Image (cartoon, helix red, strand yellow):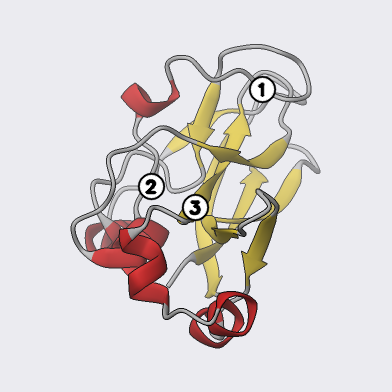
Amino acid sequence: MPAVMMLKCDKCEYKKVTSQSSCYLTLSDGEELVLEHPAEEIQAFRATGKHLNELFKEGRIKCKYGLVCITCGEWDLYSISKEQSTSGYIGLLVARARDKDLENISCKYCGKNTLRSVMGSQVGCLFAFIKLIFLKKDYFPCPKCGKGKIKFDITGIS
């Protein structure tokens, strides 16, 4: 399931609580409905009369990924052009935005092309959790003070 992340500077008060990703259903009128975890299946069925796997195969289930801008320090959810996951909607939900996925995406707040995944440089969900908990942490320079390093830590699972 998507991780809840704490991004925190080791030198100043900069701190953000973020989400790894969020799942959305595109309704027939084009509106997006947030599918809140853990009731994605129930919400999707109530809205469409179809099961989540069927909606996923139709391309109506999308995820937005948590990205932080290392220039201004703001965080938001962004749609990213990714290949449709072969492991279903759960694979899509726990996937991580890779650097190559972010090449043409600019920050909603400052316009800079300096977005990074809140999951850091991990390659896959299980390895991401192991690495964040036990191994070397990922860091980037603090966008607020410029002196500290932003640490990524998992604080929960949504």
Quadrant of residue 129 within the rendered picture: bottom left
Mark 3, secondary structure of its residue: strand
Question: From this viewpoint, is residue 54 visible?
Answer: yes
In the rendered image, which residue does mark 2 sit on? 137
Callout 2 crowding tier (Cα within 10 Å): few <14, some 14–19, many ≥20: some
- Which sits earlier in the primary sequence, circle 2 or circle 3? 3
Residue 13 image offset from top left, x and y in percent? 81, 43
- Quadrant placement of the C terminus: bottom right
- Quadrant placement of the N terminus: bottom left
Residue drawn 52% across the image and 55% down it? 20
Where residue 63 is drawn, which disc sits there? 3
Callout 1 crowding tier (Cα within 10 Å): few <14, some 14–19, many ≥20: many
Question: From this viewpoint, is residue 134 visible?
Answer: no
- Which sits earlier in the primary sequence, circle 3 or circle 1? 3
Q: What's the residue type where badge 2 is placed?
A: Lys
Quadrant of residue 76 within the rendered picture: top right
Q: Is residue 45 left or right of residue 132?
A: right
- Number of dots carrying numbers: 3
Mark 3 → mark 1, Cα distance in angstroms: 18 Å
The answer to whether mark 2 and mark 3 are in CB contact below 8 A is no
Mark 2 → mark 1, Cα distance in angstroms: 24 Å
